Amino acid sequence: RNGIVGRKLLSLHHLYSTQTCTYGICLDIDGVLIKGNQAIPRAKKALEFLSGENVLQKKIPFVVLSNGGGLTEAKKAESLTNMINFPISPKQLVLAHSPMRSLVSKYQDSLVLIVGGAGYSCAEAVIPNDIMRWEPTIWPYASIMQGSSETPEYDFSKQAIQAIMMFHDSRDWGRDMQIMLDVLQSKDGYIGTLIPEAEEILHQIPLYFANPDFVWSTEFPIPRFGQGAFRIAFARLFEEATGKKLKYELFGKPETPIYRYAESLLADQAYEICKRHTLPKHIYAVGDNPAADIAGANAHNWNSILVRTGVFQGKDNDVRFPADHVAQDVFEAVEYMFHKEE
Ligand code: G3P
Ligand code: MG
């Protein structure tokens, strides 16, 4: 009897829960919520506003959507929570490599070179330091050999690398470009070998990049090179070395996979607040990088809001990737959305 009554009450509650989730928002991290290790002044105020501290006491579904990475979503959520002093759940966090989880299962039984860690990866994942440990002469200029001097776990002349994934930014461009080129020029992934002159590089070993950002916003007053700059430089080196165009698959903003991934998390947030698992009709995105945040939002029919606290510092709007709205900071952006929707 209680079960039936309980279910009836629940369905009535669902039916009459006044809170609607007709709109939601995705917030970028670097240059919007934080700069380097510092929270941006009104970031916490914006998150509190979305969590109900507004005139309607309304909770608004939000997701944090970044081209950053290098950590698991849980670790990144913890570090963001501490920096901004506001609880961010891993369930609300999309990192550049989040949509690449599907790839991890595809290469479950392969030996994969991971550049710039993500905290999770394929079962058989190796990093550039594993290769340095196996053969230190592969990059004579290595600054310091991180990690212990334990005996190498792999012999890359006998164990072939079958894919390369760049999850986060390289900490040693020279070393990583040299090693990545060695793998891509090798005979079937055996480092130290070369594809015979005659053979075309037809089926280049698969290469994936998580983050397209040419630059990103840190504590330094001028934006710094991002993983996109590494990729552009590496593609040029590859072409110079092989005479072939580099083939790769690109993830992160403005590419589509991360938008689909963010939409699924936003629908989950709408369910948590409004008990209806539907994607909010209007999705807003706040970002500081026109080439990533605004280009991506515009291309996926989201409402784009550009802020002046990061990469973009212009007076008006970005010329190449104009946003639907330009705000001083993330709090002004959230207020703009609220007044537009309510
Ligand atoms: O590496 C992080 C950088 O590319 C920018 O991240 O949070 O501004 O998308 P975000
Ligand atoms: Mg940013």
Image (cartoon, helix red, strand yellow):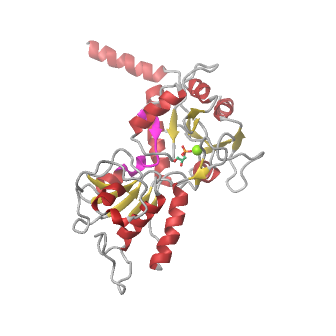
Q: Quadrant holding ligand 2?
A: top right
Answer whether residue 100 is magenta in the image.
yes
Q: Furthest-right residue in view?
A: 315
Residue at position x 38%, y 19% from top? 10
Residue at position x 49%, y 33% from top? 80
Looking at the picture, how far across and down is residue 91, in whole percent?
A: 42, 34
Q: Is residue 272 above or below residue 297?
A: above
Answer whether residue 169 is magenta in the image.
no
Q: Is residue 24 above or below residue 142?
A: above
Residue 54 versus residue 40: which sits nearer the camera? 40
Looking at the picture, how far across and down is residue 66, in whole percent?
A: 51, 44
Looking at the picture, how far across and down is residue 219, in whole percent?
A: 61, 40
Task: From the viewer's perspective, tell me whether residue 49 is left or right of residue 131.
Answer: right
Look at the image and tell me in which quarter the N terminus lies.
top left
Residue 241 versus residue 92: which sits nearer the camera? 241
Whether residue 127 is visible to the viewer of this picture, yes or no, is: no
| Range of residues picked out in magenta | 90-101
Q: Furthest-bottom residue in view?
A: 198
